Image (cartoon, rainbow, N blue to C red):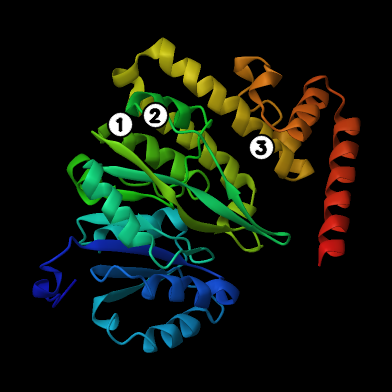
Amino acid sequence: MDGLNNSVYSRNQLVTIIVPIYKVERFMAKCAESLLSQTYPEIEYVFVNDCTPDGSMNVLNAVIARYPHRKPYITIVNNETNRGLAYCRNIGMKHAHGDYVMHVDSDDYIAENAVEMLMSVARQSKADIVVTDFFLVTPRGVKEIIHTYPEEKEDYLENVLKRDLPACIWGKLYKRNLYCEHDISVPEGIDFGEDMVTLPRLVYYAEKIAVAPPFYYYNQLNVNSYTKCIGEKAITSVIRTEQTLRTFFLDKIGREELERLLSVYRQKMRAELLFNTSAALRKKYVGLFKQDGIDLRLIPSLRQRLFICLLDKHLYLLANLYLSCYHFLQMCKRRILG
């Protein structure tokens, strides 16, 4: 950061928090307040405005005004055009100076002591990456999501590649040199699955991974979220993600083992994409990743398993009817719950 006063950071290591911003006016204040009120003092913030058309930036600036001690360590990057999540992650990294980096999505928020707690775990364990579970924020309330994390890095990497553990890039702490020394960035245009194309590569280069208590609140209330838009761009992003991972890991894991892991990933992603896209795109991409055959046991969601079973038995009308009924019932449930 230009003019950064390094003497301020004499006691602790610097952490950079990168935040992409697009259509989050309703959520921006809670997110920004949770970041700027952190108990850990040595933080720089990089907010990336992806040409948001609403009042998100006005809300952000109003919150910043209430934290004058943080203002010198805040960078706001204004994209000239809407570039998508991948570009925002990458440009945020280019402005980062921290020893460690965090990614926080602007419709989410974190606990007040999150950075202090993560840095404590990183120091004590000498970890390159600190991972955690998270809290899911839904219309019905807040629910803690719990996973079992393996002790060995290789086992963790395998579980991420198979999507048995979350591949989200947010809610973790990373040594910045993992990105810089290995030239890791998100291929521009991969805005759905940008986590999956990034996290496994970071994990591969990490020497030590530690687990911390949950601190991240993942918001499922934002209808404008990048991950809510399962259109054709999202589908092609997943295809590119799978290709990128294959290219990266081919000489690192071995072809047979890599194909075994990616086969699990493909089947899970095929179910998720076809279940959540439009009827027209479902018809166009019904054969997506079908080279693996069908193993319904790999699909953890019962509703998706039933849907894929109908689809792959060529019972398209019944599959679409089932999906329409499911979405109708979900809509009724949301209205009842308010």
Q: Which is in the foreground here, disc 3 or disc 1? A: 1
| Circles 3 and 2: CB atoms closer than 8 Å | no
- Say if residue 47 shows up in the picture: yes
| SS under mark 3 | helix
Per the image, the residue denoted by label 1 is: 204
| Circles 2 and 1: CB atoms closer than 8 Å | yes
Residue 206 image position (x, y, % from top left): 26, 36
Tell me the residue at 40%/33% (across/down). Answer: 244
Per the image, the residue denoted by label 2 is: 157
**Alpha carbon separation for disc pair 3 and 1:** 26 Å
Check the picture and name the quadrant holding the N terminus. Answer: bottom left
| SS under mark 2 | helix
**Which one is earlier in the sequence, the residue at label 3 or at label 1?**
1
Crowding near pointer 1: few (<14 within 10 Å), some, many (20+)? some
Per the image, the residue denoted by label 3 is: 272
**Which one is earlier in the sequence, the residue at label 3 or at label 2?**
2
Residue type at mark 2: give it: Leu
Q: Is residue 153 above or below residue 26?
A: above
